[in-house]
């Protein structure tokens, strides 16, 4: 007999994707500049793909965190004060809300009377969220 295991997304468990890492690192670099910085220079410093950087930063532009100027002397610059931007703001712009729910695996129905994961996943997610909330871009200037 073959047991079928349903596929679920782990939406409540934090993950630091390449996109969110690009966003956080790039925002720190941008906040450190007076006149902005372009995706090529960010790629040289971080080692990430310039195309992926540009794509991620456009999401931050759409969410009013950054300004973008095209052309040879263009680049990205801050639209908001670094002291007003937390790492959580940046993370959630890329990954969506980092919620801590009753079930760390987002299951609606569970056949157990207590979570097999215990409280570990929720504790780690809460600690990660707390850290990101306490850190502003200003902290890294």
Image (cartoon, rainbow, N blue to C red):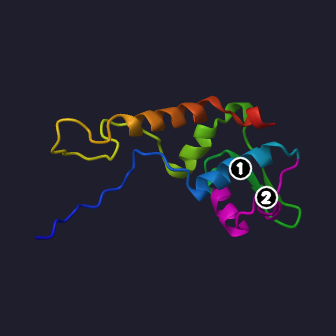
Q: Measured along the vertical axis of the image, is residue 27 above or below residue 4?
A: above
Specify the quadrant that holds the N terminus: bottom left
Query: What residue sits right under mark 2 in the picture?
Result: 42
What is the x, y in percent for residue 106? 31, 46
- The residues bearing labels 1 and 2 have C-alpha atoms spaced at a distance of 9 Å
Number of numbered tags placed on the structure image:
2
Q: Secondary structure at mark 1?
A: helix
How dense is the environment of label 2, judged by Cα within 10 Å: few (below 14), some, or many (20 and up)? many
Quarter of the rendering containing residue 100:
top left
Whether residue 83 is in magenta: the answer is no
What is the x, y in percent for residue 80? 72, 38
Q: Measured along the vertical axis of the image, is residue 79 above or below residue 45?
A: above
Which residue appears farthest toward the left when viewing the image? 1
22 vs 68, left or right, is: left
Q: Is residue 5 visible?
A: yes
Provide the residue span drawn in magenta.
Answer: 35-58
Query: What residue sits right under mark 1 in the picture?
Result: 25
Specify the quadrant that holds the C terminus: top right
**Residue at position x 77%, y 37% in the image:** 140
What is the x, y in percent for residue 61? 67, 52
Quarter of the rendering containing residue 115:
top left
How dense is the environment of label 1, judged by Cα within 10 Å: few (below 14), some, or many (20 and up)? some
**Residue at position x 58%, y 38% in the image:** 88
Magenta: main secondary structure: helix
Residues under numbered marks 1 and 2 in contact, where contact means CB atoms less than 8 Å apart:
yes
Q: Secondary structure at mark 2?
A: helix
Ranked by sequence position, the earlier of labels 1 and 2 is 1
Which residue appears farthest toward the front when viewing the image? 1
**Residue at position x 80%, y 65% in the image:** 40
73 vs 112, left or right, is: right
């Amino acid at each position: 007999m073959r047991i079928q295991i349903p596929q679920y997304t782990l939406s409540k468990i934090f993950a630091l994707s390449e996109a969110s890492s690009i966003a956080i690192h790039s925002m720190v670099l941008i906040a450190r500049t007076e006149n902005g910085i372009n995706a090529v220079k960010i790629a040289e410093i971080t080692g990430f793909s310039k195309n992926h950087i540009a794509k991620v930063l456009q999401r931050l532009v759409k969410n009013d965190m950054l300004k973008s100027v095209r052309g040879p002397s263009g680049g990205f610059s801050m639209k908001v004060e670094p002291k007003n931007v937390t790492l959580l703001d940046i993370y959630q712009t890329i990954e969506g809300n980092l919620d801590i729910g009753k079930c760390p695996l987002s299951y609606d129905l569970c056949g157990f009377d207590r979570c097999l994961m215990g409280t570990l996943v929720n504790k780690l997610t809460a600690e990660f969220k707390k850290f990101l909330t306490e850190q502003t871009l200003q902290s890294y200037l």
